[in-house]
Amino acid sequence: MEDVIGSVDAASIGHGARLTIDLSAIVENWRRLGAQAPHIPCAAVVKADAYGCGLAAVAPALWRAGCRTVFVAHLSEGIAARALLPEAAIYILNGLLPGTGEALLANALRPVLGSREELAEWAGRGPAALHVDTGMSRLGLSVPEALALAGDSLVTGAGLDLLMSHLVSAEQPGEAINARQVADFARVRAAYPGLPASLANSSGCFLGDGVPNDLLRPGYALFGGNPMPGSPNPMRPVVRLEAAIAQVRTVEAGESAGYNARWTAPSRRRLATLSIGYADGYPRAASGRGHALVGGVACPIAGLISMDLIILDVTDAPAARRGEPAVLIGDGLDVDTVGQAAGTIGYEILTGLGSRYVRHYVV
């Protein structure tokens, strides 16, 4: 792998942790997802700063690989994406918020319209997507509304170039709601002939040909998350997070560690303190539940995670010494596992990666 951005060592820029992002893995994941339906194009969802991986590096890498359509959540993200991708089709998933029309136009951005009010306000302004709610109950026209509006001037004048909806439980293929959503979306799609349709998110890409699609729309899986929980992850890992051990000490049985003395040594133990904490996006909820790898050995988190520091019990890790790395994400300890240990999901781990890291990119 060749360094391309941010190759300065973490220690030399004053932070004890290092976040490495593999751009080649993101590109390979995009290709693997596209291969699930090779007869249609594959877009990329790069909202939330490309799921915490850095839009400025990720978006151009995907463009070079052939990705021509991206989705973001907010206008500000769309403006940032447009500066990086002058020719891409860029959709704003959160729609046409009041007062944003002129900025969308100025940056050639395409809102995902989900109400009569948005359709009327956008009329004649340029390309846009139509969002139909098939079960999420967040944004979008209801299925009856969408069917009733087919052929209406409100729709024909909105410049629509994409019809889309969002799957509720695509990561659980056996859920009945998937079949209901597919059937409802197929009805709406039939009412809008000639309008390309997009339903498959990351997990939806693996639901097979029964999902009506003209454009795949993966996000999380691009960045190494498992789109098929309970099965081996078909995606390459993307993110590696490691922190230097700042200090190693020995504590005797009965001594405590961390705030509120939540952890007490059951016997004589070795503890290592890492220069990273919840201000860096590592969740405090992983206190006493998560672990890191030191020399390949799983070392549990001891006590409460602090704002800037984490304590590990490294009694069983002979490689633990000052300056040695502890791996918090990587080497088989993936974002989904870290999320589970914190009582959350890998999405939250990725998107919460702190701004204090200097991201180190490799291709």
Image (spheres, helix red, strand yellow):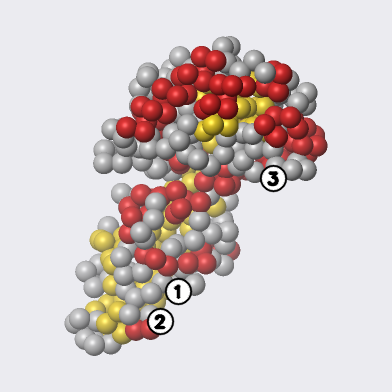
Asked whether the viewer can see residue 205, the reply is no
Tell me residue 299's x, y (percent).
28, 66
Q: Kindly identify the residue that appears in the image at 27 percent across and 57 percent down.
A: 296
Q: Quadrant of residue 304?
A: bottom left
- Depth check: give the residue in front, 200 or 44: 200
User: Callout 2: helix, strand or loop?
Assistant: helix
Vertical placement of 355 versus 264: above or below?
A: above
What distance separates the C-alpha of mark 3 from that of mark 2?
Answer: 39 Å
Using the rendered view, name the quadrant where residue 194 is placed.
Answer: top right
Give the percent coordinates (x, y) of residue 145: 58, 27
Along the line of sight, which residue is nearer the eye, 140 or 267? Answer: 140
Residue tagged by mark 1?
A: 306
Inter-mark Cα distance, 1 to 2: 8 Å
Q: Distance from label 1 to label 3 (Cα)?
A: 32 Å
Query: How far across and how far down the image is residue 3, in percent?
Result: 52, 44
Mark 1 lies on a secondary structure that is loop
Pointer 3 with pointer 2, Cβ within 8 A:
no
Asked if 148 appears above or below 240 in the picture, the reply is above
The residue at 54%/31% (across/down) is: 142
Image marks 1 and 2: residues in contact by CB distance under 8 Å: yes
The answer to whether residue 117 of the structure is visible from this angle is yes
Task: Residue 76: give its label.
Answer: 3
Relative vertical location of residue 181 with respect to residue 345 in this rendering, above or below: above
Tell me the kind of residue under disc 2: Tyr
Residue situated furthest top in the rendering: 194
Q: Which residue is mark 2?
A: 259
Does label 1 or label 3 sit earlier along the sequence? Answer: 3
Residue at 39%, 56% in the rendered image: 344
Q: Mark 1 or mark 3: which is in front?
A: 3
Q: Earlier in the sequence, mark 3 or mark 2?
A: 3
Q: Residue furthest left?
A: 267
Tag 1: residue type? Answer: Ser
